[in-house]
Image (tube, rainbow, N blue to C red):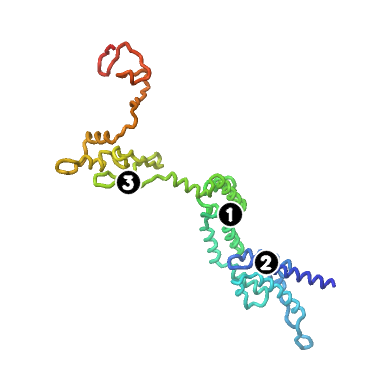
Amino acid sequence: MTSSSSEASQISKFNSALNSLPIHLSPTNYLVWLNQMTPLFEYHELYGHIDGSLPPPVESTIVDGKSTPNPEYKAWKSVDQKAIILLHNSLSEEVFPDVVGYSTAREKWLALAAIYSDSSIERVQNLKDQLNSITKGTQSVAEFGRRFKALVDQLAAIGHPMSETDKTHSYYRGLGPSFENFSIALKAAQPNISLRELQARAENSEIFSRSIHGTQPSVAFSAQANRTSPNRTNYRGKGSNRAPYRGNFRGGRGGRGGRFYQPDPCQWCGKPGHKASNCYNLLNQTASNSSGVLKSKPTEEQVAQAFKAKCQVQDSKPDWYVDSGATDHMVGSSSQTNTTASFSGSCVEENSSPWSM
């Protein structure tokens, strides 16, 4: 009775394992699948059927000159079938054809390892090339870390593990320029940091930066760069007599460049890129002579007259006077100041002798 209860319990556990496998083997997740299946085979006492420690006994024995089925082989075969059932149940439809044609659990296990845990030079170089070229880009640090660790784990699974120093060096490089300050500071402070701690620090830095900028550090940096970039486009007006606009550049010291600035707009038409003396509209206005031929350039008097005509005074208040810093000023009319006082004494004009008031 006890034996029957124990057998029923084992069957129940085995069926539960068949129905609760979260990961099925695909061409890209061999290492994860391997970590799932190894303890499962050990728990059900089936691991000896896949690692070769429990080889099959002979199928038959010779007794009195006759071939007799070996009862030990029959018992081994029954257990091996359980291992095969568990193995088959963990394969995806895409991978299942790879084990067709093999009769024992170990043969199937080795076939999968040969296909998906290939230790060839080409596979090793391919994984290393991927590690050298992988970058975070627009992904989050967590997503980048998962991709990076998957490549590192695949190298370890085929017998080519990376040193911790090589892992962190490749990880720093993959973070990219948006994490340059972070990488330099952390490498100086903790030169022997582990990959796990490095990834945790990078994720915390990203979260903190987002709390300040409201976006990823690389995006915030790009936006700031766009706001401060100078406009280098040239302005070219219509007409043959309009001078083209050329951005002025003042070089800085030490080869650090300079800054661009636009000249003042035209006093006549208000558009940038030229002065009133070269204004196309002003040339048209001042061009009327008896022959109808356009003058090449207006005189200074014409420019002044045109500018005066263009100006529209909106306020009748008197002009402002520049404060020269002097304590006293001399004006021709007392109405032009708020406070007046009579002056008695002598004054000296430039290139002149003193004179009394």
* Amino acid on which disc 1 is placed: Ala
* Amino acid on which disc 2 is placed: Leu
Residue farthest along the right direction in this orientation: 1
Residue 46: x and y in percent read 72, 70
Q: Work out which quarter of the rendered image holds the N terminus and state it.
A: bottom right
Q: Secondary structure at mark 2?
A: loop
Residue 238 - label: none
C-alpha span from label 1 to label 3: 47 Å
Residue 63: x and y in percent read 78, 86
Residue 16: x and y in percent read 72, 68
In this rendered view, identify the residue nearer to me: 215 or 122: 215
Mark 2 = which residue? 21
- Residue at (61% x, 52% y) in the render: 194
Residue 195: x and y in percent read 60, 53
Mark 3 = which residue? 235
Mark 1 = which residue? 142
In this rendered view, identify the residue nearer to me: 93 or 193: 93
